[in-house]
Amino acid sequence: MTASASNGPPRMRLSVIGIGYLGLTHAVCMADLGHDVLAIDVDSAKVAMAARGEAPFFEPGLEPLLRKNLDAGNLRFTTSYREIAEFAEVHFLCVGTPEGENGAADLAYVHAAAGALAPHLRGRCLIAGKSTVPAGTARQLLATIRRAAPAGELVDLAWNPEFLREGFAVQDTLSPDRFVFGVTSPAAADLLRQVYRQPLAAGSPCLVMDLETAELVKVSANAFLATKISFINEMAAVCEAAGGDVMALAEALGHDERIGRRSLAPGLGFGGGCLPKDIRAFRATGLKLGRKPLVNLLDSVEEINLGRRARVAELAREMLGGSVCGHRVAVLGVAFKPNSDDVRDSPGLDVCRRLAAEGAVVTVHDPAAMVNAARLWPDLGYRQSVTEAVTGADLVLHLTEWREYRALDPSALAQVVAQRKLIDARCALNAELWRDAGWAVRILGQR
Ligand code: NAD
């Protein structure tokens, strides 16, 4: 470890491999904690952007912090594995683990990164995996890397899964709910404690365990969250059928401390680059391990989740007299969640796709995600303002609960639409306000 010039916290030399949502945030935050960070990606355009101080994606607070640490000189970017191997004492592995065959995690990027790094490792170092991987990956990777690295047994490996939420990534990285260290040696845990010295001192709990359990913590946390979301969404469907109000139900359930209010928000369900693929990967693990109950549970979670998207399309047909064909539908929000430009497995975009396939003319507004959405679905109409998007619309769909949509003036929008019809698929708008302005409003989870 290199000592800092001042009496500040000890500076460590870290590398971060893969500068996507997770890796870039991690690199920037580790530099902000005072470490010297060298980050690498195989995508040279991304590396060049980051080196210029531009984040390749939208994440609140990230870009100013990126610039600050570039200017301070303790954050740099490269495409050279030799350079990071010679530089860093801890290498954080943050590459993607997308969905592969039969839903299982595709570990090709993890193996490629490890394979590119290992031949350059000539001295003692720690590789800390942060990507989400199936149980058993880390132990296998450690053996492979030790075989390929000139440093052999001097290379150690830990699994330090990441729990950050897009939209809160900086805050979650700098002060996480907990740290999980999967290790095979006390020295690895000590090194990680040094990296995270400041958040640990500020009170973030730290749990040290074996590699397999650490890998499982991440996927089971995601499975639990997805189950909670799907549970309340199934209750929304039950409320629609039985004549209840799921918002009142969720509130009453949430007051029970054993249940809790968080992630009990009914709506269009989960999406994004993590939860859906992690659930499918865990299902594949369940199959491999012969755990039928886990497979059945996760199948139900997914069925309920996709069912909410189908339900919005069904409600749209109902509100437009049986068919959306030829009708103009305005969509507010296609990011998979607010405060993000991520449209990977976006529930909102999926609804757009379903309605467009049925002949609706779909126009879209989103404060941050339109560029990414247009890349996937160039045929939808993208508008720079809500007013432009809803002008002439027969139906307005609220599909991502951006804060600014709550502040919309339903009376003003009523002047520009063709029909005052709204579906609030996120149960987040003030329905009374919209109804007072003459809108017919349907809310998921209310009859
Ligand atoms: P991403 O696709 O945004 O980024 C992955 C990056 O890795 C890309 O920039 C890619 O070019 C780079 N890469 C691929 N192969 C490489 C190689 N051989 N060497 C160097 N770079 C390489 O993915 P992400 O969302 O950042 O997710 C990364 C991992 O973190 C996944 O396992 C994911 O499940 C997990 N995770 C993500 C989040 C999140 O909110 N996005 C949260 C927790 C965990």
Image: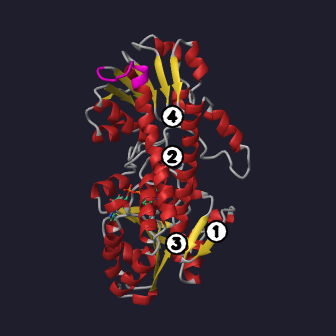
Pointer 2: residues within 10 angstroms few (<14), some, or many (20+)?
Answer: some
Q: How many marks?
A: 4
User: Looking at the rendered structure, which numbered label has been put on residue 206?
Assistant: 1
Residues shaded magenta: 317-326
What separation in Å lies between label 1 and label 4 (alpha carbons)? 33 Å
Q: Please name which of the two marks, 2 or 3, marks the residue nearer to the observer.
A: 2
Considering the numbered disc 2 on the image, is that residue within a helix, a strand or a loop? loop
Which of the marked residues, 1 or 3, is nearer the chain's N terminus? 3
- Against 60, is 70 above or below? below
**Mark 4 sits near ligand 1, with its Cβ under 8 Å away:** no
Question: Spatial distance from mark 1 to mark 2, Cα to Cα?
Answer: 23 Å
Q: Amino acid at mark 4?
A: Trp
Residue tagged 2: 167
Which one is in front, 50 or 253? 253
Majority secondary structure in the magenta region:
loop
In the image, 87 versus 178, the foreground residue is 178
